[in-house]
Image (tube, helix red, strand yellow):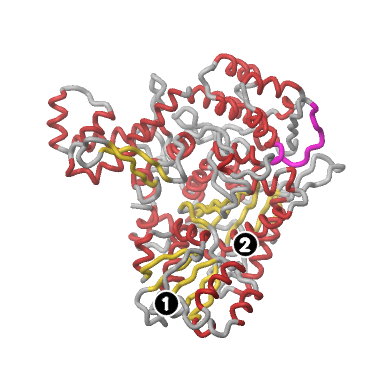
Amino acid sequence: MSLDSEASSQGGDYRSFRQITRDRLLFEMLRSTRKNSKSTWKVLIMDKFTVKIMSYACKMADITEEGVSLVEDLYKRRQPLPSLDAIYFIQPTKENIVMFLSDMSGRSPLYKKAYVFFSSPVHKELVAQIKKDSSVLPRIAALSEMNLEYFAIDSQGFITDHERALEELFSENAEGSHKYNACLNTMATRISTVFASMREFPRVHYRIAKTIDASTMTTLRDLVPTKLAASVWNCLAKYKTTIPEFPQTETCELLIVDRSIDQIAPIIHEWTYDAMCHDLLCMDGNKYVHEVPTKNGSATEKKEVLLEDHDPVWLELRHAHIADASERLHDKMTNFISKNKAAQLHQARTDGELSTRDLQKMVQALPQYSDQIDKLSLHVEIAGKLNNIIREQCLRDVGQLEQDLVFGDAGTKELINFLRTQLVVSRENKLRLLMIYAALNPEKFESDKGAKLMQLAGLSADDMIAVNNMRCLCGPDTKKSSVGGFTLKFDVHKKKHTNRKERTGEESTWALSRFYPILEQLIENLSKGELPKDEYNCMNDPSPTVHGLPTSSSARTSPAHSMRSRRTGGTWARPRGSDDGYSSDSVLKHASSDFRKLGQRIFVFVIGGATRSELRAAHKLSSKLKRDIILGSSSLDDPPQFITKLKLMSVEELTLDDLQL
């Protein structure tokens, strides 16, 4: 059961961010057309963008239940259905308006009546264009602004679908480019529709521009958070006068930052199940393809599955350390066997201890339990693949050095020794190590040392571009190095953000769990009202109750963990059955009581791509701070995607498909 459905079944008032988005689309839009319509069934027509909005929040069964018999693409040839009403959910663009008018004008319109819902505010000129057509006006049953133009990727996350934000806002070519303002304006509009959906009016905090010294001109790249905050503020000001029941005073917090706050989070190897799946398995979004036996068992066939909230095993394990996830899966399989007599008999015949793979094969041979075991078998297979990759690519050694570099336990000597001795480590992983090292030690790349390190790692010219382009995320560049055309100069004011300190009170018994994203600390500081004044401004002065929480909402302390020694053989140890706040049981058992006590929401938007570690932090801190934390970004990037985007910042007229690792 998903968190959304559990909260609903408990009868609580709490609805997750994705649930609110879903309810608006299904009830506020689709169900509202039933009132004045004589047509039982309707056609839903969307453009490419609104199709994605709908698909992230709703299932086809949800849409059908609201009386939609057919879903159509606005730009594809469609069969006339003059006896049916149509619901248009489209972006308010000139092209879309032309297509709509073509459908509904003249003597023979495609549909009887049209209910038109725009995903964002529509310009007066476009409304005037619709009103000009006298044949269309009587056929319009509704004309409304939904103000919902984002993808709800998670119960606590959304993206604005700006995959080229790094290139359009932070590349050196961004200066004076028309794409710069277009990207920021669209992004601001889409962020604002989040607050229209949530009926929230935020205090808008943002990272202010930094320059190296007074003589350095502030660049457009450095002004991105400031400009976006201003644009969001302008949109929200309009909502206050145009949207009924929109709050007139502040109800929540919004923090706008860019990717420069933490260049390491998008690159470092994350050791949670979710992050490793997306990093190592070449998944297409949340889609995983695996081979399953055919019905007669004589061969195998490929099957696509979605790793999403409707899968209870995924929901429980996604934020768990990979070793913890593997242990839990083995426990689940063992428990299943112990409760099944046929499996016990089979085990007795084998007269030996069974591996996880043996358990998987055994259970698959029990058809009466196929529905129950399908998901479990899937995750056993995935975890097995991940552990194989970890071994084959020596990722434990890579991960150890990454974290030692981040926390100051390793330096140049250890990095050089690793590059010389670990010959089986892939070029991609060596690239990621050097990018982390460059983010932490920019001064090392101001001479030929950087070029020699990259040469030692065997990096390609494309790889060097990725390292070089990290400087574009970090503000002004006052000094250029003449070594081989390679330049790297980080903003000295931001360097302190990349040097993480050990988190006290959050020790984990799992190895390679020390790393945490800088965003985690920023959210905690924002919650306490302790954002550094010289680094963050607020568009609207906070009121005295800005950080007020209900008196019953003091942060719940974490349950005590019973510790045990690390296992030998390279496994990571955590008390089995411990409440880490991530398991489905842990989350759900507190749902009915905790959700009613949540304080004001915190929204955080990361320009230039968020990471899975940052999304995980939003979930973790919601429980810790008892405040619903929503993470937004221009995109959600895994390390291979992020590195590809860094490379694209220097390449013109290429798409993301043209340049892959």
Q: Is residue 298 above or below residue 85?
A: above
Q: Nearer the viewer, residue 112 or 2?
A: 112
Q: Is residue 90 above or below residue 291?
A: below
Q: Answer few, some or many: residues within 10 Å of disc 1's Cα (few below 14, many 20 plus, some between 14 and 19).
A: many
Looking at the rendering, the stretch of residues picked out in magenta corresponds to: 471-482
Q: Is residue 363 above or below residue 121?
A: above
Q: Which residue is mark 1?
A: 85
Q: Quadrant of the C terminus?
A: top right
Q: Quadrant of residue 479?
A: top right
Residue 355 visible here: yes
Residue 545 visible here: no
Q: Earlier in the sequence, mark 1 or mark 2?
A: 1
Q: Which residue is mark 2?
A: 189
What is the magenta segment's predominant secondary structure? loop
Q: Is residue 28 left or right of residue 480?
A: left
Disc 1 secondary structure class: strand
Residue 657: x and y in percent read: 55, 42
Magenta stretch encompasses residue 628: no
Q: Is residue 96 left or right of residue 378?
A: right
Amino acid type at image mark 1: Asp
Residue sitting at x 50%, y 54%: 628
Residue 370: x and y in percent read: 22, 43
Q: Answer few, some or many: residues within 10 Å of disc 2's Cα (few below 14, many 20 plus, some between 14 and 19).
A: many
- The numbered disc on residue 553 is none
